[in-house]
């Protein structure tokens, strides 16, 4: 199983990478939302799931999600939004746009794994 993580926080990359170790999930990470989106749009590898931060510089998670859901090859991939300070309006917009769920930072790896399993079921 292949998961893409797009988040600008190093601590999130470290905790998710460590947490997914040994679970059978392969992780490709991006700190920059534009680089992550370009990688997804190129379609070299299609992930089973995308973990997407809501608040990032250069391009926020809402805009990235819109581009993902507009792409015919990506629109059916479950997206879990991650946020530390996201407001309810942004979270509701993401859910309305088709995000699978939202996970509030900081979160436990157990909570993340439960959401991943639920999204892939």
Image (cartoon, helix red, strand yellow):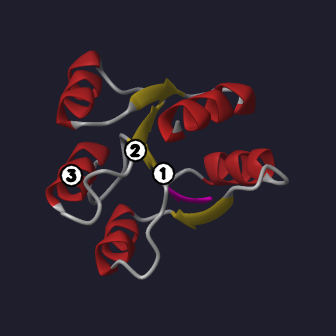
User: Could you tell me which residue is drawn at 36 percent across and 70 percent down?
Assistant: 40
Which range of residues does the magenta coloring cover?
Answer: 1-7
Q: Can residue 6 be seen in this snapshot?
A: no
Q: Position of residue 48 (x, y in %)?
A: 49, 56
Residue identified by numbered label 1: 49
Task: Tell whether position 78 is magenta.
Answer: no
Choose top left, top right, bottom left or bottom right for residue 25. bottom right
User: Could you tell me which residue is drawn at 24 percent across and 36 percent down?
Assistant: 98
Residue identified by numbered label 2: 78
| Foreground of the two, 69 or 35 | 69
**On screen, 16 above or below 26?**
above
Q: Are marks 3 and 1 in contact (CB under 8 Å)?
A: no
Q: Mark 2 or mark 1, which is nearer the start of the sequence?
A: 1
Spatial CA span between label 3 and label 1: 13 Å
The 10 Å Cα crowd at callout 2, few under 14, some 14 to 19, many 20 or more, is many
Q: Position of residue 105 (x, y in %)?
A: 56, 28
Q: Mark 1 or mark 3, which is nearer the start of the sequence?
A: 1
Q: Are marks 1 and 2 in contact (CB under 8 Å)?
A: yes
């Amino acid at each position: 199983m292949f998961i893409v993580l797009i988040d600008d926080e190093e601590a999130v990359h470290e905790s998710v990478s460590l947490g997914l170790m040994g679970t059978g999930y392969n992780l490709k990470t991006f700190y920059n939302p534009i680089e992550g989106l370009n990688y997804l749009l190129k379609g070299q590898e299609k992930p089973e799931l995308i973990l997407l931060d809501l608040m990032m510089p250069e391009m926020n998670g809402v805009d990235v999600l819109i581009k993902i859901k507009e792409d015919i090859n990506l629109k059916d991939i479950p997206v879990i939004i991650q946020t530390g300070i996201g407001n309810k309006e942004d979270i509701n917009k993401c859910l309305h746009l088709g995000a699978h769920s939202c996970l509030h930072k900081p979160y436990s790896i157990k909570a993340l794994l439960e959401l991943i399993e639920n999204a892939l079921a």
